[in-house]
Image (cartoon, grey):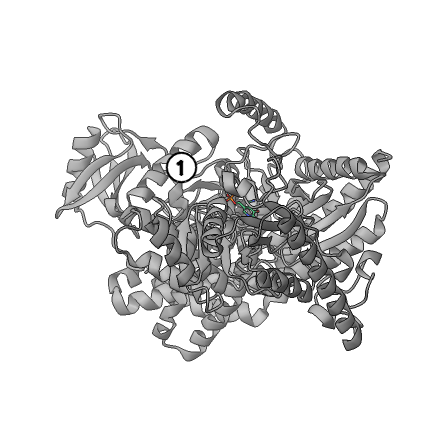
Amino acid sequence: MLALRSSPPSFGAAEGERIARDLYGLAPDVRRLPGERDCNFHLRTADAREFVLKISSLSDVEGTDCLVAALDHLAEQGADLPVPRLFPTLTGTATGRVSRDDIDCAACLVSYLPGRVLADAYADTPGTARARLLQGAGEMLARLDHALQGFFHPALNRRLAWDVRRLPELAVHLDLVENPRIRSVIEAVAIEFHEALPRIRGLRSQAIHGDGHAANLLVDGAGAVSGILDFGDMIHAPAVLEPAIAMSELLTNGVAPVEAVSAVLAGYARRQRLTERDLSTVYDLVCARHASALLVHAWRRRHDPQGARALETTGEYGADSLLRLTGIGRQQLTQEWREAARMGAREAAGPGNHGEAASSSAAAAKTASSVDLARRQRLMGRGAELFYERPLHLVRGSGVWLYDPEGRAYLDVYNNVSHVGHAHPHVVEAIQRQVAMLATHSRYLHAGILDYAERLTARLPKRLDTCIFVNSGSEANDVAWRIAQLATGRSGALVMENAYHGITDAVAALTPSTGVPRDARVLTIPPPPPNLDYRDGVLGRSAAGPRAGGDDGARAGGDDGAQAQEGDALAAAAAAAEADVAIARLRERGFEPAAFYLDTAITSSGVFDPRPAWGRALTGRLREAGAIIVADEVQYGLGRPGSHFWGFERRGIDPDIVTLGKPVANGFPMGVVAANRSLIEALQAKFGFFSTFGGNAVAAAAGTAVLEVLDRERLMANAAATGDYARGRLEAIASRHPAVLGQVRGAGLLLGLEVRGADIAGSKRRTKRIINFLAAEKRILIGYEGPHATLLKLRPPMPFQREHVDMLANAIDEAAGWVMAGSAS
Ligand code: PMP
């Protein structure tokens, strides 16, 4: 549940006086100030020094710690900013402990900033000067955000009802909104916002103030914005939310009309760069903030009348303002606001613009990473793998973005572990909640792992009804191998050419893509012929280059039933023949197949997407020969194919064992083996099985949260739509650079793009150059793939959107031109 109640600790003025004396040695006059979560006092000493004493409940100890850390950060990074400064207690600590009615609280002392609140100053400002005042508010928020760029604290991800991204949760209180018209408008806003959320999560994010309303901004005697107060609502969120909140608060508090608030955005854009994507969400953010405020107000009217009084003006103006906004509509307002922001940015173009990271920070980054490199080699060995010629130092992630210490954003088109997006708040919260409650292994009864197992197996074929929990994909494949050998009494294995299945001794033998010596018991099967692709009904067409993407199997562009059948028959015949050869060769060596492993994305073999007839025929033959079919879903599972939840479904395969890793817990280590109960019980009976961390309560919570987010945000449908769009764009670009780029392979959000060169070595060199160019020049992170490392590997977190595809595609287009211009190979 979100905390909606306004419940500041209730200390009286006399206690305020006592605390000021005991903790700070002051003897001031004390006056109570309003506060939503904190109990605040204004202190004035006999020598006319003024302070604010803030007392917060220790139930929000993280929030208090965050506030202190933020003010410390600003003292250093924003020394010129008019924000409150923190004073230590007599004993030198940042906060002091106080209590009342047995409730422990933290007290801190900050400077009192002079000035009138913006709401009052605006009312007294002549019409012609009002736009300047609001622009000043936007600029001040942007300066603050600039200073906050390197700041992070875990509490920035805590659940706050006022965080607009919580609107879908707040909407459960919709019934409390009495006016049916307003209710239905709020509902419509909430639905639209829910749909926009993945896009919003994809925006550049950072620590923001998060509550720039007109009582938190101060204006000096000359009519200039001169201070910012109240850092208690800071969150890690898209930067554009900062001006959007300020705009919304001006409206819901009846301070300024809709026509006036674009000045805030213009002011913000003078100092901080706002992209087109940022600007396309301002309407959603402003409406959502209105809706959140109205829902909190409605809830408090019912449950917390005193708290509702603090929102009286919202109750008075908020509903009309929301009707006004939605009446004017998204298109017009977005256009007006975009224009205002562009103008602000244009006016400011020049040396005063702090939008881009200063060039000196690039030098700082270089030194930092070279220091890291030497230390790393000493501590981790020279062979510890690193990406990119200029290795990246990353300090945090959010959605599809990763950030370096200077706050520069990198578009992540590589990491599938953060399946539902980096630092997804729902998963973060689930992990935090569980780790704070209980973190033990699975030898005690605990509902969490059972709930997860139920949810997971409900999505698998009925036969796969039982799970073993481990900590990685390698371990899952290792357990599957033990199960297969035990169940069949055999020791031979078949895998795809250049397959990757993991790092344990046994699984390394099933992994021909690494340099582990070949094991006589393991044979490989060649990848499916590329011209029998999932989408193609006509032989040879996929090799010919661009084709219509986005359609399903045999129904692809112009394909008719007879061609589809022909394609299926050829694919099945090719697969069966390869299976027969491999089985026969294995038998020649004296082994029968215990298992066949397939990475269902066929990733390291070259990212192939064969039609289901191939998979069906191949596994049919192998099963006849007695092999256990293992679908390794470490790469493709959990919706990444877009068309299906599991890769094996797209391949037409009915597996005996499914193994899972990377994406299942969004970065928390977790692996799963799912199989029929008889197979798993056989292993348990013969050898026993227990993994200390496997299936621990925290992993279970993370896994469950991932499944919830996948559903809530419809990420599988997103993978289908975005994946198809990406194929289309990449194919168009490839056809413009036929000497550098070739086939686009794969489906959903796992794609490979072939890089061509004079020979394999040339292709490999070019692949490397493109990848390094994208990382260094475009801040777009991709990898390489395939037996010769000649494919660009595109495998982003699942909330990847069209606009991210556009950034990627345009950058690849440029890179291909650059490669052509710069070299013969
Ligand atoms: N199977 C496949 C298909 C993989 O791609 C990987 C990891 N790259 C693994 C198994 C091994 O997973 P882990 O690194 O978690 O051990």
**Mark 1 crowd level (few <14, some 14–19, many ≥20, 10 Å Cα):** many
Q: Picture coordinates of residue 457 (x, y %)?
A: 43, 64
Using residue 647 as the reference point, say whether residue 741 is left or right of it: right
Relative depth, front residue between 445 and 196 = 445
Q: The residue under label 1 is which amino acid type?
A: Ala
Which image quarter is the C terminus in? top right
Look at the picture and state if 673 lies above or below 151.
below
Residue under the image location 54 percent in, 70 percent down: 326
Using residue 680 as the reference point, say whether residue 29 is left or right of it: left
Picture quadrant of residue 226: top left
User: Would you say residue 413 is visible in this rendering?
Assistant: no
Q: Secondary structure at mark 1?
A: helix
Relative depth, front residue between 415 and 224 = 415
Q: Picture coordinates of residue 35 (x, y %)?
A: 29, 50
Residue under the image location 63 percent in, 47 percent down: 523
Look at the picture and state if 4 lies above or below 780.
below
Picture quadrant of residue 153: top left
- Mark 1 and ligand 1: say if the CB distance to the nearest ligand atom is below 8 Å: no
Relative depth, front residue between 53 and 664 = 664
Using residue 615 as the reference point, say whether residue 407 is left or right of it: left
Relative depth, front residue between 548 and 257 = 548
Residue furthest to the left in view is: 101
User: Would you say residue 709 is visible in this rendering?
Assistant: yes
Q: Picture coordinates of residue 745 (x, y %)?
A: 72, 54
Picture quadrant of residue 762: top right
Q: Picture coordinates of residue 38 (x, y %)?
A: 28, 47
Which image quarter is the N terminus in? bottom left
Q: Which residue is mark 1?
A: 70
Residue furthest to the bottom in view is: 180
Using residue 61 as the reference point, say whether residue 114 is left or right of it: right
Residue under the image location 84 percent in, 34 percent down: 822
